[in-house]
Amino acid sequence: MELLEKMNVRVSEEYKGFGDVASGLRVYVEQLKGKSGNFEEYVHQIEEIEKQVTEFEAVISVLDKYVSLLESKVKFVYQQQQHPPPTS
């Protein structure tokens, strides 16, 4: 009977230690949740910036094509002024 009591006390002490560990883990998990909540805000901001950059790149591409077209036209007009076609 004494052996059984000693075993119960020992097991009780073990479980108390596990309880303390579990309590510490709960606090740690709550802290992580708080931190991850802050990261979610940053992730959302990064996604918005990425979306805006993609849209900006599309606008730049269109402007680049337009500038190239204007450059071609200006070169053509300049060449026409330098070397006018012969008049009949």
Image (cartoon, helix red, strand yellow):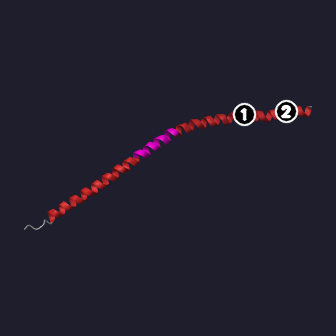
Whole-percent x, y for residue 3 in the image: 91, 34
Give left or right: position of 75 versus 88: right
Residue sitting farthest toward the right? 1
- Look at 46% across and 41% down and name the residue there: 45
- Look at 64% across and 36% down and name the residue there: 28
Give left or right: position of 51 versus 29: left
| Residue ID for mark 1 | 20
Residue sitting farthest toward the front? 88
- Look at 59% across and 36% down and name the residue there: 33
Give left or right: position of 26 versus 64: right
Magenta extent: 40-52
**Dot 1 crowding, Cα within 10 Å, few <14, some 14–19, many 20+:** few
Question: Which quadrant of the rendered structure holds the N terminus?
Answer: top right
Q: Amino acid at mark 2?
A: Asn
| Residue ID for mark 2 | 8
Whole-percent x, y for residue 49 in the image: 43, 44
Q: Main secondary structure of the magenta part?
A: helix
Mark nearest the camera among 1 and 2 is 2
Q: Is residue 43 magenta?
A: yes
Question: Which quadrant of the rendered structure holds the C terminus?
Answer: bottom left
C-alpha span from label 1 to label 2: 18 Å
Please tell me whether mark 1 sits on a helix, a strand or a loop. Answer: helix
- Look at 40% across and 48% down and name the residue there: 54
- Looking at this view, is 42 or 67 the one in front? 67
Whole-percent x, y for residue 5 in the image: 88, 31
Residue 14 higher or lower than 71, as above or below: above
